[in-house]
Structure formats: structure tokens, C-alpha cells
Image (spheres, helix red, strand yellow):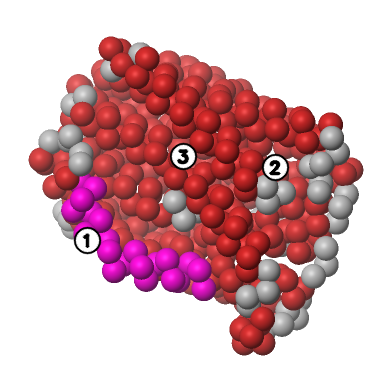
Amino acid sequence: MHRQVLWLAIPMVLSNITIPLLGLVDAAVIGHLDHSWYLGGVALGSTMISVAFWLLGFLRMSTTGLTAQALGAKQPLQLARVFLQGTLMALGFAALFLLVHRVMAHHIFTLSDASEQVKLYGQQYFVIRAWSAPAALMNYVILGWLLGTQNARAPMWMVIITNSANIALDVLFVIGLGWKVEGAALASVIADYSGMGFGLLCVWRYWKRHNLPSLRSQLSVSTDGLGRFVKLNRDIFLRSLCLQAAFSFMTFQGAAFGDQTVAANAVLMSFLMVISYGMDGFAYAMEAMVGKAIGANSESQLKAAITGSFFWSLMICLGLTLVFGYYGEALIRLITDIPQVQSTAERYLPWLVAMPLTSMWCFLLDGIFIGATKGREMRNTMFVAACTFFVVFYLFYPLQNHALWAAMLSFMAMRGLSLGVILTLQWRREAFLV
């Protein structure tokens, strides 16, 4: 059981480590320029592009769950159909986003209370990075489908190639060529298309090896099961909307507290991404294993997946707590050499020390519910958690940025608590596998 969990989780943990590493390199490269507004602008622009793309992250989640269930039920036709439906939806959303992204950027940045310099560079980053939409959204589908087939090594290399290219191009464009914010955005665009090319090659190889039906033969029946696919995506989209409302508010409200605060929060959010992407490796493993167990209607497989993932997630979170507690200040100084940003980030570091063990539960339970394709429960609990976030922030508003981090910690805790209650109740009623 432990071998199976680690076989799926370790490749995704290793690949996911490159994602916050990319954020750290972005912050370090831009953070060593001569003004803090470059770092604040990249933080604001990248947050907004992440909101736009992450709101469509249901493409990966639904694809993973439905693919794993089709694999567990031994339905090759459904495996092919899920990939086709996801691809058509991803490309449709990408085309729509490219049509409206300039208008969207204008309205989004008008609402920000950040300084004019931060908004200028944030919008600059957003408009360039938008052109990665077709690749970024297709990558969601490709990652989800490969994970659903219990293949973690191909997604690992796909993510590593994407982020390694991004890091190398960051250094070349920003430091070597002096393109500053435009260079950081262009590096991400090129890297996303590189990852998509490799991912499509991996899908093609699996398709040929397992002799799945051709995409052309599936076009006439691509609407079969589409209602379930759309409904699941709708629920996960609404869940993602609540999630991004909290994270976007974190950046926008931090910007209202001043350029130093938004820059310091960008550094600390890089630490939070380390937690998120490290834990997501086990959540992805959970999605694939739970989906396959439910497709096969096997309660024993389901219990094994939950037990093994919990143990290793606990080990990871204990390690991250110790790292942030003992080396947090050194990591902050490694990322930026601006004294005001360093001192501001160190003031709020204790919130990050408390974050790993608090947030562990929500990541694990997300993996369980995604694999089970229980979108309605995920939607409802995320709404409750988002309400908790805003209530806590406004209750402690006089503490300003401390209130923001208290709200984020409460948000993570409520996500885990509410999903845990639902899992317990459904398990007792023997309704979870249904």
C-alpha cells in the first residue's frame, strides 16, 4: 500500500517542487531589481493570470476523477471520450479568454488599490502571459488524463520540463537581456507550450500502447456522458471561484496596505505555494487511487489509499513546519535583498510556520472527493470556508496584514474540517462509494 502511494505521489511531489521553485526564482530575479514595484507588479499580474487559469482548473480535476473511474471499471471507450471532451472544452475556453483578456485586464487593474507603478507592471505581465492560455488549459487536461491512468512519471517530466524551461528563460530574459517584467511573462508563455508538446507525446504513446479508439471515431459520440462532465465541471468551477476569491483578496488587500506589504506577502505566498504543491503531490495520488477504487467498487482499495496518503502527508508537513520555523528568515533574505521587504516578511512569518499542519487536511480530503467526483460537496464546503475567511478578516481588520494571514489560516482549517465531517457522515451511512 505504501509503495503504491509513493509510486504515484513522489513523482508529483518532485515535479510540483519545481512550481514554487519557479515562483521563488521569479521573486528572486525580479526582487533583486532596483525597485520594489517590479516585484509587486509581477506578484499582482501573476496572481491575476493564475486566477483566470485556476478558475478553469476543474479541467484537470474532473478529467482525473472520470479517467481513473473509467480505468477502474475497464472502459477504454470512456477513457478516450473523457480526453476528447476535456480537450474541446479547454480549447473553447482558451479562445474565449484570448478574445476578452485586454478588456478583462483593464477592469481588473482599475479595481486595485496598488500604486500606479505596481498596476502598470502588473498589467504588462498579464497581457503578455495571456497568450499561454491554449497551452495552459490543455496542460490541465493532459495532466488530469495521465494521472487518471495511474501514470505519474509522464506528468512529472511534463511539469519539470515546463518549469525548468521557465526558470532558465527567466534568468536569460530578465537578467541576461534586461527585459524585466516582460521577460518574466514571455518565459512563462514559451514554457507552457513546451510542456504541452511533451504532454501530447505522452498521451499519444499511451493511446497507441493500449490501442484506444481514435479521436475521430469518438467525435460522433463525444456527447455521451457530457451532462455528467459538465455538471461536475460546473461544481468544481464554483468551488474554484470561492478559492480564488480568497487568494485574490489576499493580494489586492495586501496591496492596499502598501508596496512593502504586497511585496512581503509575495515572498510569503511563495512559501505557501511550497506547502500547496508539495501536498498536492499526495492529493493527486489520492485522486487517482480513489477514482480507480470507486470505478472498481472496492472499499478495501479506498481504505488503503486514504491510510497511506495520510501517513506520508503528515511526515511532509512536519518537515515543512521545522524548515519554516528554523530557516524561514534565511529563506526570506535569499529571495529578496530589499531591507524593508525582508523586515516586513519576517514580521508575518509565524503564520507560515502554523500553515503546513493546519492545511494538510484540506489537501488530502480534496484528493478524496475529486477522485470520487463529488463536486457538489466540494462546492458547498468551499463556500463555507470562503465565508469564514472574510468573517475572520473583518473581525480582526484593525490588525491589517495580520488579519489577512489569520483569515487564510482559518480558511484552510475550515476546508479540511467541513470535508472531514461530510466524509465521516457518508462513510457511516455507507454512501461514499455510491
Pick the quarter of the image with the N terminus: top right
Q: Kindly identify the amino acid type of the residue bearing the numbered disc 3.
A: Leu
Could you tell me which residue is drawn at 62 percent across and 29 percent down?
Answer: 418
Residues drawn in magenta:
88-109
What amino acid type is highlighted by mark number 1? Arg
Magenta: predominant secondary structure element? helix
Residue highlighted by disc 1: 102
Residue 390 visible within the image: yes
Label placed on residue 368: 2
For the residue marked with disc 2, what is the amino acid? Ile
- Is residue 332 positioned above or below 202 on the image? above
Give SS at disc 2.
helix
SS for callout 1? helix
Left or right: where 179 falls relative to 62: left
Name the mark on residue 243.
3
Label 2 to label 1: alpha-carbon separation = 37 Å
